[in-house]
Image (cartoon, rainbow, N blue to C red):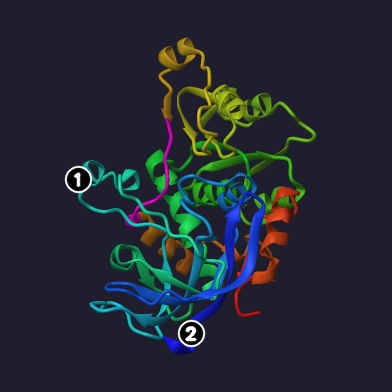
Amino acid sequence: MSEVSIMKAIQYYGPENIKYEEVPVKPPEEGEVVVKIMSALTCGTDVKTFRRGHPVLIKSVPSGFGHEFAGIVEKVGRGVDKFKPGDRVVAANSAPCGHCFYCRHEEYNLCENLDLLNGAYAQYITVPARIVEKNMLILPDDLSFDKAAFCEPLANVVHGVERTGIKKGQTVGIIGIGPIGLMFARLAKLKGANVIVAGRNPIKLKAAEEFAHADEIIDLTKYPNPEKIFREYTDEHKGLDVAVECVGLPEIWERIFSCVRPGGTVHFFGGCKSGSTVTFDTTKMHYGDITLMSVFHHTPKYFRMALDYIASGELEVEKLITDTVPLEKVEWAMKQHIDGKAIKFLVKPWM
């Protein structure tokens, strides 16, 4: 790999400490694949990691940074027969081991040996053998790298929507319209649901209309108490059939619980800070026959479903791209996210 032994990349050194550097390209070991990254995306999880670190994603420093990408196979390691140089691919940021307690119960997202891949903000990434085997896919010829890079975040949402069991005719309310909430809203619409969303960022409120095609959009800067409005838009004003929290704040978990009707489902999709607690009305929960649920991460099944959704053209994911930036502007992009000025940035390592 002498011709690509060095690459430009963003390296993570600690909270609010990332650097644009030249680093070695890791040669592929047995089962591994080196991918030339053509498109990468910023993500809310990366923004959180940039701000305060992440004990699961970043186990040691310096570390590669970023995890949503698509590109071209540059080189394959020994034993790789499913891919060859020149293949256009997308890879997930993890793959289950297949052997632990949870994998034996087909709860692959809870795998005890889930090793997360970072390094998408770079010109090349070396994909571990397990991900190559279970969670790397060849792209349709007519699908762009820019769109394909959405597979990983969308896979989480597909998992959430499928597990929630959203049905045609239901009224689904979503608080939090970042890229995840927006994709959740769009998939709920494709399931035939009546979708109401609530948020406060004008860029994201616009995307709720143009990308998610939400039926009702609540601007929380004008209506800070969405519970009443959610109820007004539901059948006989009973409350939501499905209420989804996509913010990840305990106080919003509690508020979304109050929006659901008896017999409904509350999906806590936004992950809260470690150690957080919430309080619910147990009488309403028990005698209201309310289902409470959360879904974490994705599985190979949902990663493949995400690619199918994107390839079908049913989700115009490119509408979620705020702007395109080169690698050296990743730190600027993180700060734009923090300031609420973006949904997702498309990062092009070869600009």
Main SS of residues in magenta: loop
Q: Amino acid at mark 1?
A: Arg
Say left or right for 226 vs 110: right
Badge 1 element: helix
Instruction: Specify whether residue 121 is painted magenta.
Output: no
Residue at disc 2, secondary structure: helix
In the image, residue 256 above or below residue 330: above
Front position in the image: 199 or 332 = 332
Disc 1 marks which residue?
104
Instruction: Give the residue displayed 20% in from the left and 50% down from the top.
Output: 99
Residue type beneath disc 2: Val
* Residue 297 in magenta stretch: yes
Measuring 69% from the left and 42% from the top, which residue is drawn there?
217
Write the start and end of the magenta stretch as one range: 293-301
Say whether residue 50 is visible.
yes
Alpha-carbon span between mark 1 and mark 2: 40 Å
- Report x, y in % for residue 173: 57, 36
Question: In the rendered image of this protein, does residue 344 appear above or below residue 34?
Answer: above
- Residue sitting nearer the eye, 281 or 192: 281
* Residue 229 position within the rendered picture, expressed as x and y whole percent measured from the top left: 68, 28
Q: Are marks 1 and 2 in contact (CB under 8 Å)?
A: no
Asked if 278 appears above or below 196 in the picture, the reply is above
Horizontal side, residue 186 vs residue 292: left or right: right
Mark seen at residue 4: 2
